[in-house]
Image: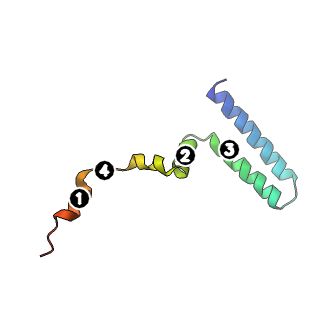
């Protein structure tokens, strides 16, 4: 099974969640089902998994850190 087939299954499940959410009375359960639908729908969006991974794991966001020598500039200033 390839990536496209998995994404199609996720989209089908998202559609089922949406249909179910539309069929039930307004309330917490309906809100939850729309939230589940939104997450499943977004999973198939390009770059979404990486975005979520970075937001949930602070160690991944450190990869964007630029550890150049510019951080030490404040040590070179004279306070005379």
Q: Which residue is mark 2?
A: 53
- How crowded is the residue under tag 2: few (<14 C-alpha within 10 Å), some, or many (20+)? few
Q: Which of the marked residues, 4 or 1, is nearer the chain's N terminus?
A: 4
Q: Which residue is mark 1?
A: 72
Which disc number belongs to residue 57? none
Number of marks? 4
The reply to whether dot 3 and dot 4 touch (C-beta < 8 Å) is no
Q: Residue at x 68, y 28 (%)?
A: 5
Give the x, y percent position of residue 37: 73, 48
Residue placed furthest toward the bottom: 80
Residue placed furthest toward the top: 1
Which secondary structure lies at badge 1? helix
Q: Is residue 32 left or right of residue 39?
A: right
Q: Which of the marked residues, 3 or 4, is nearer the chain's N terminus?
A: 3
Q: CA distance from mark 3 to mark 2?
A: 16 Å
Q: Which of the marked residues, 3 or 1, is nearer the chain's N terminus?
A: 3
In this view, the mark in front (1 or 2): 1
Assign the C terminus to one quadrant of the image. Answer: bottom left
Give the x, y percent position of residue 73: 21, 61
Q: Which residue is mark 3?
A: 41
| Image-quadrant location for residue 45 | top right
- How crowded is the residue under tag 3: few (<14 C-alpha within 10 Å), some, or many (20+)? some
Q: CA distance from mark 1 to mark 2?
A: 31 Å
Q: Which residue is mark 4?
A: 67
Q: Residue at x 33, y 50 (%)?
A: 66
Q: CA distance from mark 3 to mark 1?
A: 45 Å
The reply to whether dot 3 and dot 2 touch (C-beta < 8 Å) is no
């Amino acid at each position: 099974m390839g990536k496209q087939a998995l994404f199609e299954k996720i989209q089908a499940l998202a559609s089922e969640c949406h249909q179910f959410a539309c069929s039930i009375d307004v309330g917490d359960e309906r809100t939850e089902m729309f939230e589940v639908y939104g997450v499943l729908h977004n999973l198939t969006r390009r770059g979404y998994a990486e975005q979520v991974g970075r937001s949930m794991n602070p160690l991944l966001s450190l990869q964007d850190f630029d550890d150049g020598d510019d951080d030490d500039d404040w040590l070179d200033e004279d306070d005379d």
